[in-house]
Amino acid sequence: MPNKTIYVSDGDLPLYQRAQELAGGNLSSAITTALRRFVDVEESRLEGFKEIVVRVGPKGDRKKRFTGRLLGEWGNSTNSRMEMYRVYGTRSGKFVLHVEKSPEWAGRDADGNPAAGFRSWLGLGNYSWTFSSGESTLEIFESVEQLRDKVPAQLYDMVVGAISEPTVEDLDI
């Protein structure tokens, strides 16, 4: 097995010692793991990918991380709710769908009917305002066809266009 000598500055020595402790005494294993991660991140960056961090869950209270590139996004809003769809492509060829839905709000009168008109906005009458929590979801698909029924048609067309656009390598320039 070949030997490689790594010179470590005095200031970096505690970092190397801690890495060796965490790797069970095998510094070579720690360095190899770090180099694999470094090469993967840099190759991804050169291919146009970056680390994506999204919030998921009923209140968006959890974070999910992955490496990808945005292929398309589409938003829809009504008087009481907003939805945002984002589709990412991954280096492995999969598709990640992240959907964020804002909290829904609605005013109701004493009988449970939706509040209407300027009187409800001025607080004239017996109205209560309710809010549902927002939600964010993350789904992974093996193929773009699996996305078709999960996203608005406009976004699906955008994603298909993004993945079929020729690259500089494809143009053989």
Image (tube, grey):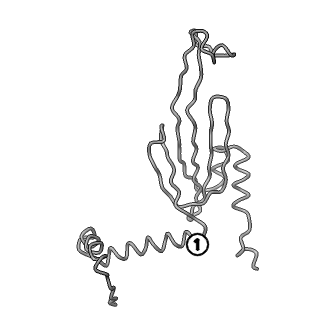
Q: How many marks?
A: 1
> Can residue 114 be seen at all in this image of the molecule?
no
Sort mark 1 into few (<14), some (14-19) or many (20+) by Cα contacts within 10 Å.
few
95 over 154 or under it: above or below:
below
- Residue at left 53%, top 26%? 131
Q: Nearer the viewer, residue 146 or 32?
A: 32
What residue is pinned by disc 1? 46
Q: Residue 149, how many percent across, how many down?
A: 66, 44
Q: Residue 24, how many percent across, how many down?
A: 24, 70
Quadrant of residue 61 within the rendered picture = top left
Q: Residue 101, how many percent across, how many down?
A: 58, 38
- Residue at left 57%, top 48%? 98
Q: Residue 104, how many percent across, how many down?
A: 57, 29
Q: Quadrant of the N terminus?
A: bottom left
Residue type beneath disc 1: Leu
In the picture, measured across the screen, residue 168 lies left or right of residue 121, that is: right
In the picture, measured across the screen, residue 134 lies left or right of residue 118, that is: left
In the picture, measured across the screen, residue 145 lies left or right of residue 100, that is: right
Q: Quadrant of the C terminus?
A: bottom right
